[in-house]
Image (cartoon, grey):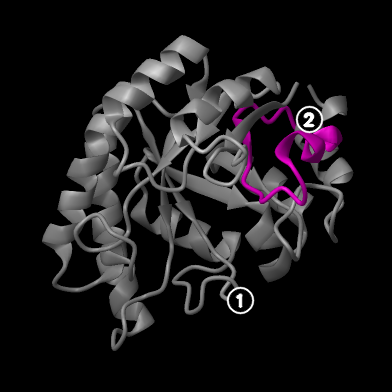
Amino acid sequence: MLKFSANISLMFGEEKNPVKRMQLAKNSGFGAVEYHFIYDMSLDALDRESDNVGVEWSVINVAVGEGVKHGPLVAAAPGKENAWRQNVAAALPYCKTLKPSALVIPAYSQPDGVSKADALTVFKENLKFAADAFGDIGTKVIVEPLNPDVRPNALLRTSDETMAIIEEVGHPNVGLEYDAYHMYSTEGNMEATVEKYLPYIGNIQIADVPERHEPGTGKVDYDGFLAALDRLNYSNWVACEYRPSSNTLDSLRWMEKWV
């Protein structure tokens, strides 16, 4: 049986307090939550509320910019290794306390003026550093390829390309984040790709294409995709990372057959 997580940066915005959205997610059948960015939120408040509500954490995203901010991918920037280590250090207490299934490293834009080869050289070394750091606390590090139409100049764009890097790094604590919203456009063959890389996939995120609304509002055959995940006995979280097309509760009708 599939288990679902809610991205409450995007969902349940009817509640203005993002921490309080956990209860709404739990009431709607979600077993876990995730946010896009949590480092400006109180760790104590997040921990207390998730314990009170009874939800787990699917993933936490590592900060990708310099100084725990949004920006170019520091993990792939020559000369910015100390900034990357600071971002890893910032994520460690959140992962120790909240115990997410995985930490996501999104492959955002490579730095200006840096070749892809040079960026990947730095990225691989920094990936090893993160894998060691989070392996010590039992958190899997997973890398997320991105659609360049959504994230211009994305460093990694397909599952195959990302898996080649993961296999080259060869660290047992590194895996793959599969975001169906991005990968539907960049590679297609979603069911076959998930089956091929199933042992490496630490989390799956879903949203329909092109408007990033709930399943059933766009081009993706999510009935077929979710049925395939069920058939494959996929056991990690399926995270709903979409913007509801109306109010959040109405947007959840697609999920009734799966929970």
Of circles 1 and 2, the one toward us is: 1
Residue located beneath label 2 in the image: 230
Q: Where does the C terminus fall, quadrant-wise?
A: top right
Q: On screen, 149 above or below 230? A: below
Residue 213 in sight: yes
Numbered circle sitting on residue 168: none
Along the line of sight, the residue nearer the viewer: 116 or 39: 39
Along the line of sight, the residue nearer the viewer: 37 or 190: 37
Marks 1 and 2, how far apart in space? 30 Å
In magenta segment, residue 168: no
The amino acid at mark 1 is Asp
**Magenta part of the chain:** 230-254
* Residue at figure coordinates x 51%, y 78% from the top left: 152
* Residue at figure coordinates x 43%, y 35% from the top left: 102
In magenta segment, residue 243: yes
Q: Residues within 10 Å of mark 2 (few under 14, many from 20)?
A: some
Is residue 180 found left or right of 125 in the rendered image?
right
Q: On screen, 98 above or below 124? A: above
Residue 27 position within the rendered picture, expressed as x and y whole percent measured from the top left: 66, 18
Q: Where does the N terminus fall, quadrant-wise?
A: top right
* Residue at figure coordinates x 22%, y 50% from the top left: 87
Residue 90 position within the rendered picture, expressed as x and y whole percent measured from the top left: 21, 42
Q: Secondary structure at mark 1?
A: loop
Q: Which of marks 2 and 1 precedes in the sequence? A: 1
Residue 34 position within the rendered picture, expressed as x and y whole percent measured from the top left: 50, 36
Numbered circle sitting on residue 149: 1
Q: Secondary structure at mark 2?
A: helix
Along the line of sight, the residue nearer the viewer: 170 or 203: 203
Residue 176 position within the rendered picture, expressed as x and y whole percent measured from the top left: 51, 48
Is residue 238 found left or right of 165 in the rendered image?
right
